[in-house]
Structure formats: structure tokens, C-alpha cells
């Protein structure tokens, strides 16, 4: 059996969302995006190539993977094998170290960890940018999870230009994210991969969304450069609402929100009215993630815990880059 590599990668929450592709086969995003890595949401993945195996053996969260989940991992490992010039099958074990029963799942941390562990186990020495390009093929948001802190994903004009890279900002020392879980792990109504495709094909607001993203990226990067958390927060909340508006306008509609999602948005607005740092963002589910500061994080988490329908809250620090924890 080849050397096994165990890698940890953090999930990330986009402040400027990725919502739409321009090439499904290469998984090229239709626009750029910008995210914050979260230390509280970690995936740990071990990969070892083994000559004795006739097929990839994949375990996800303690159980054997089958069907579409297994197919997606094998397809991704095929990219790694092609690159390394091998045909050996692999043993993969991956587990999310996410807050218990959070209802969060992350293809971002999962494919970032698989890209780094898979590449190393196959004997490849890839630079971070190449790992980001590789991770993107597994999942668009995974390209961002190779890096820590604030991360900018480029849409690029060709395959090799669609990678992510870290954005340095001294705001990183000030921020926290509070994750408010709605409905304790109810399965998603629409997976984001199919939902963004359906939105692109049917939403009359999709083109307006695409036109908006470059402007929002410029505003977000300016806020990071000038350490203006209020500007970053306002932009992130507005961008998330625009993404959801485009999704809601799809035909038939894609509505990720539950009543508690709206109650949380109102609570966040009230926190701001009371002078707290709090700006909301939502992804392909009902949960609300709130950008705040170290000073206000406990207060914000307590306020959000009191909202009816919220089953858990977690305060997260910014996360670091994907890294090898063990080789064996
Ligand atoms: C984001 N999402 O920027 C956005 C906001 C969901 C809502 O990235 O098809 O799972 O694997 O490239 O990365 C989720 O999309 O999609 C996502 P694929 P992915 O975080």
C-alpha cells in the first residue's frame, strides 16, 4: 500500500456568492466569489492508494459511500490518477468535524481535503494554486477551501485561470462568524449544483445577478483593503439577498428560507440598530451565518439562540489553509 495522507480543510462561507457556472464539465464558475474560511467547520480526509484494490473504497462519516457520492469521489480521483500517471485505486475515509447535528454539509472542505490528500498520496507535489484548480473540479467552492482567511476566487477566462487565492486583510484579526442552525438538519430542498443550473436556465433575474457580482467583488475587496467591516458586512448581506432573489425568481421557484430564516434576518437588523456588529448571509439552506466581531460574538450568538426555530448556534474563528496532519 502507498503512503497514506490525512488532511484537514475548513469549510468557507461566501461573502460574495458563487451562483452559476459557465462550463459544467470543467466546473468553471460564471463569476468570481469571495469567502471567509471557518475554523469550526473542518473535514478530515485520509487517502491511500492500494494496488490490491479493484475499485475505490470510500467511507464518508463512518459509513460506506455508494451511488452518486461514490461516483463523484471516484471521478475526482481519476483526475488525480491521470495527473500522476497511475491507475491504482484508493482507500478514502472522510469525516466532517462539524457542530453536532448542524445540518451543515460541505463539498468545499470535503473536496479541498480530498484534493490535497489525494495529490500527496499519489506522489504529486502541487503548489497551492494548482491544488485550488484541482479542488475546483470536485466542487467550485472547494477551490477556496485550499486557503485560509479571506479568499478570492477568480472566474478566469480559461481553465487554468479559474483558481482562488488568499486576500490579506487586517480585518481577519477582528472577525467572527456566528452560525445559526434552523430546523436541526432537515435535508436540503434543492442541492446547490442543480439549483444554480435551474436558476441560470429559468430565472429572469439571473443576468442581473451576473452583472452585479464584479461590482460587489470590487466593493468587498475595497472594504478589506481599508479595514471597513461595516462596508464588508453590508455588502455581504446585500449580495446574499441578491443571490436568493435570483433563486426565488426561478421557475419553478427555489426557496431555501424557512420562517426562522426571516426571523433571524429581523434579529440581525435589530442587533445592528442596537449598535452591534452583525450582518447576515445565507447559502443553499435555511441557516443564517452572521459576520460579527470578537467583542460582539457572544451577544450575537445569545440573541440568535433565542429566535424561535433556531436549534443551535456556533461561534467560529476564521480558519486556516488545508494542511497535512498525518502521513503513515
Ligand atoms: C458559495 N454556494 O459561494 C455558494 C453560495 C452555495 C450558495 O458554492 O457545483 O457546492 O460543486 O461547483 O461549490 C455551493 O456550490 O457547487 C456554493 P459545485 P458548490 O458558497
Image (cartoon, rainbow, N blue to C red):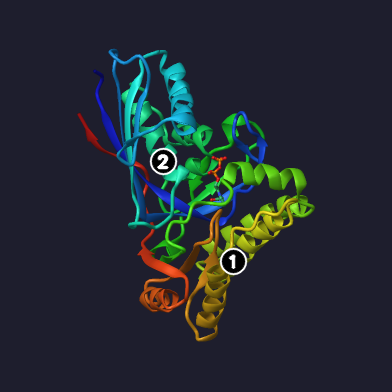
Q: Nearer the viewer, residue 295 or 304?
A: 304
- Tell me if label 2 and label 1 are in contact, CB under 8 Å: no
**Residue tagged 1:** 237
Q: Is the residue 224 above or below the residue 151 in the image?
A: below
Let me know if residue 174 appears in the view: no
* Frontmost residue, 112 versus 190: 190
Q: Does label 2 or label 1 sit earlier along the sequence?
A: 2
Mark 2 or 1: in front is 2
Disc 2: CA contacts within 10 A as few (<14), some (14-19) or many (>=20): many
| Numbered label attached to residue 172 | none
Instruction: Point out the residue furthest to the bottom here.
Output: 274
Q: Using the numbered discs, state the Cα–Cα distance from disc 2 to disc 1 in whole angstroms.
A: 26 Å
Q: Which mark is residue 110?
A: 2
Mark 2 residue CB less than 8 A from any atom of ligand 1? no
- Circle 2 — which element? helix
Question: Pointer 1: residues within 10 angstroms few (<14), some, or many (20+)?
Answer: many
Name the residue at 70% across, 54% down: 253
Q: Position of residue 21 (x, y in %)?
A: 65, 40
Identify the residue at image location x=52%, y=78%.
267
Q: Secondary structure at mark 1?
A: helix
Residue 194 percent coordinates (x, y):
62, 42
The percent coordinates of residue 69 (x first, y second) are: 46, 34
Q: Position of residue 26 (x, y in %)?
A: 60, 30
What residue lies at 44% left-to-right and 25% top-to-bottom? 74
Query: Is 196 positioned to the left or the right of 326 in the image?
Result: right
Image quarter hosting the C terminus = top left
Looking at the figure, which quarter contains the N terminus?
Answer: top left
Question: In the image shown, does 81 or 149 lie closer to the viewer?
Answer: 81
Q: Relative to 72, say whether 225 is above or below.
A: below
Whether residue 227 is visible to the viewer of this picture, yes or no, is yes
Amino acid at each position: 500500500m502507498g503512503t497514506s495522507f490525512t488532511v484537514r480543510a475548513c469549510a468557507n462561507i461566501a461573502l460574495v456568492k458563487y451562483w452559476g457556472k459557465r462550463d459544467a464539465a470543467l466546473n468553471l464558475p460564471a463569476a468570481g466569489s469571495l469567502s471567509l474560511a471557518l475554523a469550526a467547520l473542518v473535514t478530515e480526509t485520509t487517502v491511500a492508494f492500494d494496488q490490491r484494490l479493484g475499485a475505490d473504497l470510500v467511507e464518508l462519516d463512518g459509513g460506506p459511500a455508494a451511488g452518486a457520492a461514490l461516483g463523484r469521489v471516484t471521478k475526482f480521483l481519476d483526475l488525480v490518477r491521470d495527473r500522476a500517471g497511475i491507475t491504482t485505486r484508493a482507500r478514502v475515509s472522510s469525516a466532517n468535524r462539524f457542530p453536532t447535528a448542524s445540518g451543515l454539509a460541505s463539498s468545499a472542505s470535503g473536496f479541498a481535503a480530498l484534493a490535497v490528500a489525494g495529490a500527496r498520496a499519489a506522489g504529486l507535489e502541487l503548489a497551492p494554486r494548482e491544488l485550488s484548480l484541482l479542488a475546483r473540479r470536485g466542487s467550485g467552492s472547494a477551490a477556496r477551501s485550499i486557503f485560509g482567511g479571506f479568499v478570492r476566487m477568480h472566474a478566469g477566462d480559461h481553465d487554468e485561470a479559474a483558481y482562488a487565492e488568499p486576500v490579506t486583510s487586517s480585518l481577519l484579526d477582528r472577525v467572527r462568524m456566528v452560525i445559526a442552525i434552523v430546523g436541526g438538519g432537515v435535508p436540503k430542498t434543492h442541492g446547490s449544483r442543480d439549483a444554480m443550473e435551474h436558476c441560470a436556465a429559468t430565472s429572469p433575474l439571473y443576468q442581473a445577478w451576473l452583472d452585479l457580482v464584479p461590482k460587489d467583488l470590487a466593493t468587498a475587496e475595497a472594504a478589506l483593503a481599508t479595514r471597513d467591516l461595516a462596508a464588508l458586512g453590508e455588502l455581504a448581506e446585500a449580495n446574499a439577498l441578491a443571490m436568493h432573489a435570483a433563486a426565488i425568481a426561478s421557475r419553478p421557484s427555489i426557496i431555501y428560507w424557512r420562517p426562522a430564516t426571516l426571523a433571524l434576518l429581523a434579529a440581525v437588523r435589530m442587533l445592528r440598530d442596537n449598535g452591534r456588529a452583525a450582518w447576515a448571509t445565507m447559502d443553499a439552506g435555511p441557516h443564517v451565518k452572521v459576520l460579527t466581531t470578537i467583542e460582539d460574538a457572544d451577544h450575537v450568538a445569545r440573541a440568535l439562540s433565542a429566535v424561535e426555530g433556531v436549534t443551535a448556534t456556533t461561534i467560529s474563528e476564521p480558519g486556516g489553509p488545508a494542511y497535512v496532519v498525518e502521513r503513515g
